[in-house]
Image (cartoon, rainbow, N blue to C red):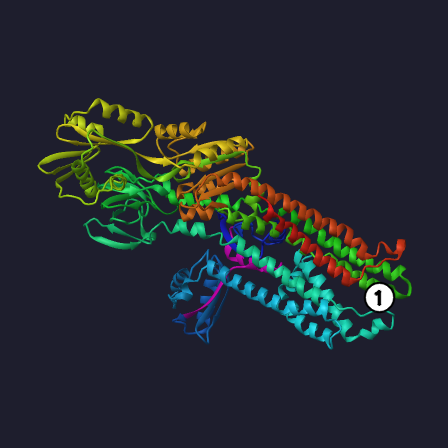
Amino acid sequence: MATISPKTVYIPLEGVESEHCALIVDKGLKQVKNLHSHSIEVNNQRAVIQSSKVSTAIPDAVKTIRELGYEVATLKNTFPVLEMTCAACAVSVESIVKNLDGVVTAFVNFATASVTVEYLPNTITADEFKAAVQSIGYDLLIETGENGTQTLEELHEKKFKQLKQRTIKAIFFSVPVVIIGMFFMDMPYANYIMWILSTPVILLFGKDFYINAYKQAKHRSANMDTLVALSTGVAYIFSVFNTLFADFWHARGLHAHVYFETAAVVIAFILLGKLLEEKAKGNTSTAIKKLMGLQPKSVTLIDETGNHIETPINNVNANDVILVKPGEKIAVDGTLIHGQSYVDESMLSGEPIPVLKNENDKVFAGTINQKGSFRFRAEKVGKDTMLAQIIRMVQEAQGSKAPVQKLVDKIAGIFVPIVIGIAVVAFISWVVFGGDNGFTQGLIALVTVLVIACPCALGLATPTAIMVGVGKGAEKGILIKDAESLELTKNVNAIILDKTGTITEGRPVVTNMHWLDNNDSAKQVFYSIEKQSEHPLAEAVIQHLDVASSIDILNFESITGRGVKASANNETYYVGNKQLLNEQSIRISEHLLIKANRWSDDARTVIWFANSKEALAVMAIADKIKDTSLEAIKHLKHLGIEVYMLTGDNEATAKAIAAQTGIEHYKAEVLPEQKAAFVRSLQSEGKIVAMVGDGINDSAALAQANVSIAMGKGSDIAMDVAKMTIISSDLNKIPMAIRLSKQTVTAIRQNLFWAFIYNIIGIPIAAGILYPINGFLLDPMIAGAAMAFSSVSVVGNSLLLKLKT
């Protein structure tokens, strides 16, 4: 019997925000049957499972994840079913839909002639439901409006808006509770007013903490939700009891304190922290989505009879002939078979100058045709194109990252059960050894331990420092996407710079020009010829000459690989390379030739302008090195960082740029996958690698690097993949980012130190460890204040970052 190969499925997760959460989910998935392998990618917010029985494995995995207190991003839609005539029809439709890969649940209602399906939108689509139902003789009515185009991004956006609303409402109700609890405790009905105001915060806006804590408890696990639920829940219930039965404590000579403000403020703080975290993380799938957007949705096929057929890209097969019109994106990889044109391949090479494509030249998916039309034969389609490989490399590299809070979450995994254990031990100890008031004191100790051990300080230690560090970076023109880059930047010892747009300006400009005689009429002719030219460098010449008006040009002729020929004022003129002038036996003065040779040695493109007898002018065009690049590279080397340059440009240009900037290590003619491979090779040597780039061609290497930095004037995709963006595209900002990283990480370590010291000292005192020595017992009210102070001290220390230069 043949074995069925396992399929890989990606389950989009919500709420799995740390390595500790990932460990809990991973442990839960071990119990799911029919899974060959499974892993959790925290950065990509997804679980990756492999199974040969996907139709049963997915529902079981989703159920397990939800039982653990986390959520799976699914869509639930109801579709009308056509052609059903009996209950047996309903069973057939339900059975076939339920067994499709990617379906979580399916239920057919025969009375309403509809099927309700919950499914993973990244695995299966409504059209596939329709095809499956049609295969057994029925049909589905699929809506094509906005409901049918709902995406995972929209689901995440909806979730974020709900969290934002809950946070705002929680803060709105908590503020008056704090004011009353701190300053107006003696006002009439103060306790009842605080009870009324804090109840929605606890039972409505913070209900997820309690639901998740319960689900964790069912699976004998504990996370930060457990501490939040226990500390706020016990404080709230204790306060309700004290409000209703104050005499219970008065009869024992104790004051009936309430802690409504503690419970409400903790919920509000944690919700605010979650909101800020979600906002900082942003949408991890944007870069992939934009990469996929480079591929057109439809193409023009040419059949054997020469007819033009507009067809979706999914229908393109190898060996199909495709027509590409001016301005269109190329859909798949292939070979040009008819026509010629310039193609913008900057998404592959990063070079700004479009490449001339003739017959038998290769063209690639995602590149953009310029002014000409041509036909090409498809060779690589779908997942085999170079664009698809870049997308896959970016996904894999993104999924291999680990967040900065990994250590904190691991400690929290131990911290939570230890705190609960201490609280219970304290309570039992007081009951056994506390005498007549043992139960009372034990209950107070239990609450005090849980209140003082609230994870606010621990939870705020990292994000507040990150917030201030990110804000300070933004003020300096450095956009930082996440905490991981801040943690690692200070450790960078190797930095890779892309050439075009990173070290250089990223656009061709005229760097030098020399005339045989400074003749205004000749300059006007040169300008007018270039105005008619379609060559990519013509624009740079036009910008440089900046003549007020052009004249009529006659007999304009493009000479392939040489330049152009045209007539004006009864004279023939040539614009192009030296070979064009030699073929026309045009005289070149020694003075101009010396200039041209010097510029060629500097790897600049040399363009000649001549009449039918002699060369009139020569100019050099190059991608100019930024004014700040030399200083920045010198600074990076001074910091002991090895600097490398990678470029898709030719060897001569790369060598010249490296020599001018003082870069000792460089590679030329490098493709996107080779850039990513070079990053991996440096990482295999134990180096912490930073990649700096600005183009789509850099995206795979940016995703692979330990620290990825994009230039703000580059492509949106490079900025989406990169963890840092330099808004001004000034390399001098990189040393600033390294210094900011050191300052921020120092603040994080200080925050964590004080958060743990506070707990190490505060929890034993709250439990009553000093009572046998000096009779001191910590009042829960003071514990609440201490908890608040610990959070304020952590935030205050983070704010000190703003004062550092």
Q: Is residue 248 above or below residue 760?
A: below
Q: Which residue is mark 1?
A: 440
Q: Residues within 10 Å of mark 1 (few under 14, many from 20)?
A: some
Visible residue check, residue 431: yes
What span is colored magenta in the figure?
A: 51-80
Q: Residue at x 57, y 52 (%)?
A: 467
Residue 344: image quadrant is top left
For the C terminus, give its image quadrant: top right
Q: At which x and y percent is residue 799?
A: 62, 51
Residue at the outermost right position = 435
Give the percent coordinates (x, y) of residue 369: 28, 45
Residue at point 49%, 54% (across, down) = 283
Q: Is 78 a magenta residue?
A: yes
Q: Is residue 340 left or right of residue 255?
A: left
Label 1 residue SS:
helix
Q: Is residue 402 magenta?
A: no
